[in-house]
Amino acid sequence: MRDFSGKTAVITGAGSGMGRYLAVLLAKAGANVAICDVNEESLNDTAKMVKEYNVGLSTHVVDMGDMDQIETLPDAVLSQHGAVDLVFNNAGVTMGSTFSGMSEEDWDWVMNINLNGVVKASRVFLPLLKDRPEAVLVNTSSIFGMIAVAGQTVYHATKFGVRGFTESLAKEFKGTSVQVHCVHPGHVGTNIIDNSRFNIDDERFMNQQIDKDKMAERFRTGGMHPSRAAEIILKGVKQNKRRIFVGLDAKLMDLAQRITPMHYEWLLPIINLPLYLIRNKKPLRGMPRDPGGISGNL
Ligand SMILES: NC(=O)c1ccc[n+]([C@@H]2O[C@H](COP(=O)([O-])OP(=O)(O)OC[C@H]3O[C@@H](n4cnc5c(N)ncnc54)[C@H](O)[C@@H]3O)[C@@H](O)[C@H]2O)c1
């Protein structure tokens, strides 16, 4: 798909980070947007930003970990927009903990949002996408769907899962009117730490004086600005790239696991430290003001 104008896009996790700027940039390109998030307040702030552009807009408060709520989403979008051309399964969370220190409830929370929700949304939206002359399904994995580190078992399980699911789906839809993409971001400066859970009593974090707020702030201000990440994702869609890597860190980490599949963790600090210094943390020019003030460096 080379032109988003007049198309309708559904974006999950649109209240913050990459989802928010996918909505803004799609609206700027003339697409109608159906924005979804579990957080009504931040979703409404994204809606205010989208309103700068003269496009159709609907907001949907949906928990992407609740399969019954996802089931009803296509009808809610159709009743407002009449069709769906693009779906971005972007909502995601993480859980910082060792596997042994994690409750089953926390495991299931991440599994449902990051993997089962992506599969369910793909299931319910694909029939609508197949009806369109050209259509796009974008599932967000991570560079952590390519490499693994300790303390993120459930995140890796979901992101490797999204990658496997999406690559197989892309092969099923090859040569049809539906483009299927998998996104692998490196470090993007978003609110994902604030929106996630940490088991601070876990043995992994003991003696480390973990301050979640400080960690969240460091993460938000140290990554590529989410508007730039969203721009890269949309460019990847226009170029019909099946795997969309976001950031030089993601590309180099992928290369590292190809070169040394058993020992790449030694290379990660060497890759990340210099990139931290040169990464573009400023928003794209001309982005609307964030009314809630949560969009990283805006
Ligand atoms: N930020 C990074 O460095 C990075 C790197 C790799 C992959 N990712 C992935 O990118 C995607 C977007 O994350 P982000 O970094 O923009 O994070 P973010 O926290 O800034 O935005 C995610 C949005 O998803 C929403 N959300 C959380 N749980 C939800 C639920 N149950 N139902 C509906 N919405 C829900 C949050 O409210 C938030 O608005 C995620 O899938 C994440 O795993 C992020």
Image (cartoon, rainbow, N blue to C red):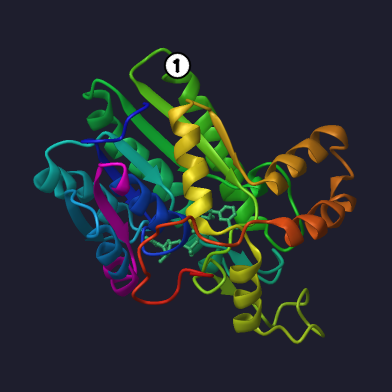
Q: Position of residue 135 (x, y in %)?
A: 31, 28
**Residue 111 seen from this side:** no
Q: With 261 as the anchor, is 89 left or right in this view?
A: left
Q: Which residue shows up at 50% across the image and 33% down it?
A: 236
Specify whether residue 26 is painted magenta: no
Q: Pick the residue in front: 292 or 172.
A: 292
Q: Can you give x and y, in whole percent of width and height, for residue 168 in the image?
A: 52, 26
> Does any portion of residue 95 appear in the rendered image?
yes
Report the number of discs. Answer: 1
Q: Is the CB of the residue bearing disc 1 within 8 angstroms of ligand 1?
A: no
Pick whichever, 109 or 261, lies toward us: 261
List the residue tagged with mark 1: 174
User: With 178 as the anchor, is 83 left or right in this view?
Assistant: left
Seen as rendered, the residue at the extreme front is 285
* Residue 77 x, y percent position in the rendering: 18, 47
Find residue 272 and report its image quarter. bottom right
Q: Secondary structure at mark 1?
A: loop
Judge by depth and name the residue closer to the eye, 285 or 109. 285
| Residue at the top extreme, as displayed | 175
The residue segment tinted magenta is 28-44
